[in-house]
């Protein structure tokens, strides 16, 4: 095989590996946002979705954030709010009762509210547990599957 053909095969293999990794991240709800948070074109949430258990970090990129903001996901207060800058904050997502899109409300210390409609989507994947901490530290989520009703 010619060297040129070998290089093409290597590039094709790398492209296929990246495609498979992107598909896995999308399936697990860990892919970065591809569009703005609900109706706010300059605002993004990363990740844009996550499991019902919560407890993972969600970064909200936008504008006009202040130190000391309060963040709620569908009325549930997010913990560990980190002010990154006036264009970004990071929070620990609270748990949700049901899957679906929820509003994120950011309230400044002065009481000014910013509402991001349907900004984050909670997903339910029966029998699949995702460790979001592994995704932050290793760059990919670790997952284990067990049939419903079985012991892990």
Image (tube, helix red, strand yellow):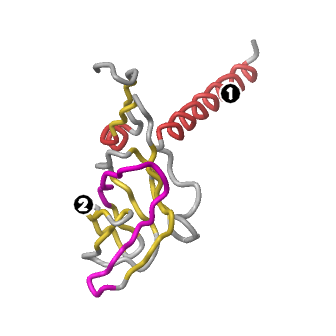
Asked whether, in this view, residue 37 is left or right of residue 132, the answer is right
Q: In this view, does 6 lie above or below 59?
A: above
* Label 1–label 2 contact, CB within 8 A: no
Q: In this view, does 94 lie above or below 112?
A: above
The secondary element bearing badge 1 is classed as helix
Q: What's the magenta region? A: 91-111
Image quadrant in which the C terminus is located = top left
Quickly name the residue at label 1: 12
x and y percentages locating residue 102 in the rendered image: 45, 60
Which of pointers 1 and 2 indicates the residue nearer the eye?
2
Q: Residue at x 31, y 60 (%)?
A: 91
Quickly name the residue at label 2: 79
- Per the model, the C-alpha gap separating discs 1 and 2 is 43 Å
x and y percentages locating residue 97 in the rendered image: 35, 50
Badge 2, how many Cα within 10 Å: few under 14, some, many 20+? some
x and y percentages locating residue 120 in the rendered image: 46, 58
Asked whether, in this view, residue 15 is left or right of residue 137, the answer is right
Q: Residue 110 carries which label?
A: none
Q: Which residue is drawn at 36% across and 73% down?
A: 106
Q: Residue at x 42, y 72 (%)?
A: 87
Q: In this view, does 16 lie above or below 56?
A: above
Q: In which quarter of the image is residue 150?
A: top left
User: Total label count?
Assistant: 2
The secondary element bearing badge 2 is classed as strand
Q: Residue at x 38, y 29 (%)?
A: 143
Earlier-in-chain disc, 1 versus 2: 1
Q: In which quarter of the image is residue 111?
A: bottom left
Q: Nearer the viewer, residue 89 or 117?
A: 117
Q: Assess whether residue 109 is covered by the magenta stretch.
A: yes
Q: Quadrant of residue 105?
A: bottom left
């Amino acid at each position: 095989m010619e060297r040129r053909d070998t290089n093409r095969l290597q590039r094709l293999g790398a492209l296929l590996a990246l495609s498979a990794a992107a598909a896995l991240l999308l399936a697990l709800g860990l892919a970065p946002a591809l569009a703005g948070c609900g109706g706010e074109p300059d605002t993004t949430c990363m990740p844009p979705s996550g499991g019902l258990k919560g407890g993972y970090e969600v970064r909200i990129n936008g504008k006009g954030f202040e130190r000391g903001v309060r963040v709620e996901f569908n009325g549930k207060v997010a913990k560990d709010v980190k002010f990154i800058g006036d264009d970004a904050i990071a929070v620990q997502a609270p748990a949700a009762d049901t899957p679906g899109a929820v509003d994120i409300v950011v309230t400044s210390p002065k009481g000014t509210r910013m509402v991001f409609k349907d900004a984050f989507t909670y997903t339910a994947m029966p029998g699949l547990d995702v460790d979001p901490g592994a995704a932050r530290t290793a760059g990919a989520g670790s997952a284990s599957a067990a049939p419903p009703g079985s012991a892990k």
